[in-house]
Amino acid sequence: MALKAAIIPVTAFGQNCSLFWDDGAREATVVDPGGDVDTIIAALEADGVALAQILLTHGHIDHAGGAAELKERAGGVPIIGPHRADAMLLDHLEQQGSAYGIHGARNVSPDRWLEEGEEVEIAGIAFGVLHCPGHSPGSVVFASGALRFAIVGDVLFQGSIGRTDFPYGDHDALIEAIATKLLPLGDDMRFICGHGPGSDFGTERRTNPFLQG
């Protein structure tokens, strides 16, 4: 079954909210609806798909601020992820929104927290869950060995890594997670990240300045 994807930039941070679906079931997954819920719903309608679930990679405002509203407007679909360690962020999304000038953000309680080694299904395809703390304590990555494709949130970027200058950030933990959990998946593993263009693990292993030495 072919997995189709679209990137929906949301919020003033240009966050890559991702939409995934297959043409068979016409059921979609939205990953990291940080805001601009009207835009996300318009994309669902344009592709003629119904939202089945919402996945969160972590609890920052630009990734999760629109999740509660989108769930409500889609008839109560489940919100899945991230790891429970990000509860302190999800419990204060409204406060984050006020700090960053993002209006309409609502606190959210996921229907299911995720743990290392679990799986989620996106359009009938299994994605393994990798807990990759550092940018936030509960950041998770979704990786499909069959598709050679991962959704990494703000753990890794083309030529960079997630910020760790928050009070709860941990640079060493982030580098360790990338080195021990992501790069071993293989150089040919492509990824979508939370901001900017995607890449593959091989290119980042060879050229990303944060991963050298």
Image: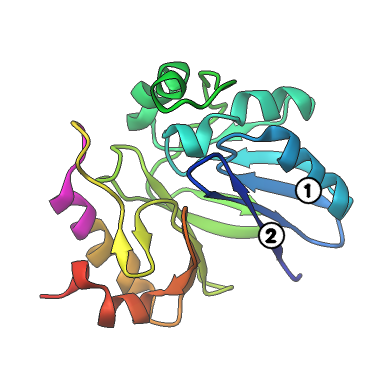
Q: Are marks 1 and 2 in contact (CB under 8 Å)?
A: yes
* Percent x, y of residue 121: 63, 52
Q: Which residue is drawn at 60% across and 34% down?
A: 35
Q: Give residue 137's quadrant in the image.
A: top left
Query: Label 2: which residue?
Result: 6
- For the point 44% across and 19% down, which residue is it? 98
- Mark 2: which amino acid? Ala
The location of residue 151, given as percent across then percent down, is 50, 58
Q: Earlier in the sequence, mark 1 or mark 2?
A: 2
Q: What element carries label 1?
A: helix
- The quarter of the picture where residue 160 lies is bottom left
Taking the magenta stretch, the answer to whether it contains residue 89 is no
Neighbours of disc 1 within 10 Å: few (<14), some (14-19), many (20+): some
Compared to residue 204, the image places residue 57 above or below, namely above
Q: What residue appears at the point 10 percent right and 75 percent down from the top-left corner?
A: 213
Q: Nearer the viewer, residue 21 or 105?
A: 105
Q: Hey, what amino acid is under mark 1?
A: Ala
Numbered label attached to residue 43: 1
The N terminus, quarter of image: bottom right
Q: Which residue is drawn at 41% across and 16% down?
A: 95
The stretch in magenta equals 168-176
**Residue 208 drawn at (x, y percent):** 27, 73
- Which secondary structure type mostly characterizes the magenta part of the structure? helix
Q: Which mark is residue 78?
A: none
Q: Can residue 123 be seen in this view?
A: no
- Closer to us: 8 or 200: 8
Q: What element carries label 2?
A: strand
